[in-house]
Image (spheres, rainbow, N blue to C red):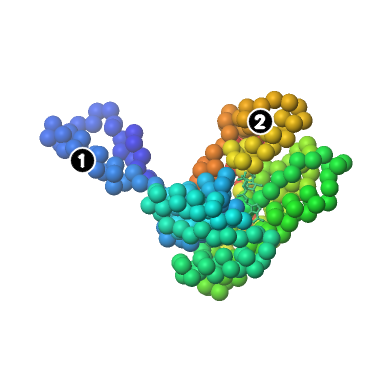
């Protein structure tokens, strides 16, 4: 059985066709496949900003959104990483824009949104992916580390949501926002109290924004990944190696969801985000959906 975007062709037992009919089917089947077996264009022509897209999960999300038909604006602190991401998008036939922004600085986010609207005429979606982690026992946690994590992970999400929502409201036809929270926002972890609290705040902001902006047709959800193979996960592995010994590159492979048995890849997160940004997720509202390979099965 082969599935092409909802069309299923069965080779049923007892299927009867004349030999010319069978020959015709086998001649045309590959062309049917080329026509129908294309990626689902869930986000055809939607203009979507992904923050923190210069590497890691943000890059995977940008690529998956472009594969789903979106025009992607990739934003990050430095332009070189996002230019590389957009280069990858363009290689696969997509179109995009690299913008520099600091999610904690409203003026840089507003300037990035202006650039996007200048190039594409509108903004349909936002993925709040930029984030930072510091791993320190709570007893030793310095205020600067907490300020950094709450600044980027919480205030940064607030600022970007506010600026994007204002733009969407001015356009008058709604939009979608997906916040990258974490399974860490739903459970406790050793030595990550501030990070986990910041991600719990993202889950909370998602609920409130979805209620406030539903009347403008803006759908706001979050996803909660866990164990995604990115530079951030390697940083976590390096910290574990410093504490317990061992090779961080080996340790990182063990930081995977037990049900899946391997690290999640950034593009896999991106595919779930593409769905959450699409019309197909219109009945999912204000939720924080676990996409963690079964790490937290509840
Ligand atoms: N990797 C995981 O296992 C995992 C699991 C759950 C959630 N997350 C979350 O996913 C998101 C992406 O994580 P990642 O693993 O790709 O991390 P990463 O460190 O590899 O990438 C984060 C990106 O965010 C950018 N960034 C940091 N501060 C910024 C700021 N002020 N303004 C703009 N950009 C900024 C960085 O430059 C970097 O490119 C984060 O929010 C993280 O908390 C990661």
Query: Vertically, is 288 above or below 264?
Result: below
- Identify the residue shown where x is 38% and y is 52%: 93
Residue labelled 2 has its Cβ within 8 Å of some atom of ligand 1: no
Where on the picture, by quarter, is residue 218? Answer: bottom right
Residue 273 at x, y = what percent?
54, 50
Q: Residue furthest right?
A: 139
Say whether residue 168 is visible. no
Say whether residue 79 is visible. yes
- Identify the residue shown where x is 46% and y is 66%: 120
How many circles with numbers are drawn on the protein? 2
Q: Nearer the viewer, residue 250 or 225?
A: 250
Residue 58 at x, y = what percent?
56, 49
Q: Nearer the viewer, residue 239 or 153?
A: 239
Query: Vertically, is 109 above or below 65?
Result: below
Q: Residues within 10 Å of mark 2 (few under 14, many from 20)?
A: some
Disc assigned to residue 61:
none
- Identify the residue shown where x is 20% and y is 31%: 16
Q: Secondary structure at mark 1?
A: helix
Disc 1 vs disc 2: Cβ atoms closer than 8 Å? no
Q: Residues within 10 Å of mark 1 (few under 14, many from 20)?
A: few
Q: Mark 1 or 2 closer to N-term?
A: 1
Look at the image and tell me in which quarter the N terminus lies: top left
Residue 38 at x, y = what percent?
35, 46
The residue labelled by disc 1 is 28
Residue labelled 1 has its Cβ within 8 Å of some atom of ligand 1: no
Q: Nearer the viewer, residue 279 or 81?
A: 81
Task: Report, in whole angstroms, how far the alpha carbon at label 1 lies from the one at label 2.
Answer: 51 Å
The residue labelled by disc 2 is 248
- Identify the residue shown where x is 13% and y is 31%: 19
Q: Secondary structure at mark 2?
A: helix
């Amino acid at each position: 059985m082969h599935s092409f975007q909802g069309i299923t062709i069965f080779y049923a037992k007892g299927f009867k066709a004349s030999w010319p009919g069978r020959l015709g089917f086998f001649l045309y089947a590959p062309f049917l496949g080329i026509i129908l077996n294309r990626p689902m264009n869930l986000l055809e022509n939607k203009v979507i900003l992904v923050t923190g897209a210069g590497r890691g999960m943000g890059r995977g999300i940008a690529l998956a959104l472009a594969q789903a038909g979106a025009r992607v604006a990739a934003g990050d602190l430095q332009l070189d990483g996002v230019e590389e991401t957009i280069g990858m998008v363009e290689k696969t036939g997509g179109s995009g824009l690299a913008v520099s922004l600091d999610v904690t600085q409203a003026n840089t986010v507003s300037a990035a949104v202006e650039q996007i609207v200048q190039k594409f005429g509108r903004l349909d979606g936002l993925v709040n992916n930029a984030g930072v982690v510091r791993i320190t026992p709570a007893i030793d946690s310095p205020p600067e580390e907490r300020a950094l994590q709450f600044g980027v992970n919480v205030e940064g999400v607030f600022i970007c949501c506010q600026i994007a929502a204002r733009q969407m409201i001015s356009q008058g036809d709604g939009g979608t926002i997906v916040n990258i929270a974490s399974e860490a926002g739903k459970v406790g972890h050793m030595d990550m109290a501030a990070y986990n609290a910041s991600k719990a705040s993202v889950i909370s902001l998602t609920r409130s924004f979805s209620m406030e902006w539903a009347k403008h047709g803006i759908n706001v959800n979050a996803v909660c990944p866990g164990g995604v193979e990115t530079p951030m996960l390697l940083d976590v592995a390096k910290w574990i190696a410093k504490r317990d010994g061992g090779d961080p590159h080996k340790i990182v492979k063990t930081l995977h969801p037990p049900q899946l048995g391997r690290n999640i890849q950034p593009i896999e997160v991106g595919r779930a985000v593409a769905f959450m940004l699409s019309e197909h997720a219109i009945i999912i509202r204000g939720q924080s959906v676990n996409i963690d390979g079964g790490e937290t099965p509840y």
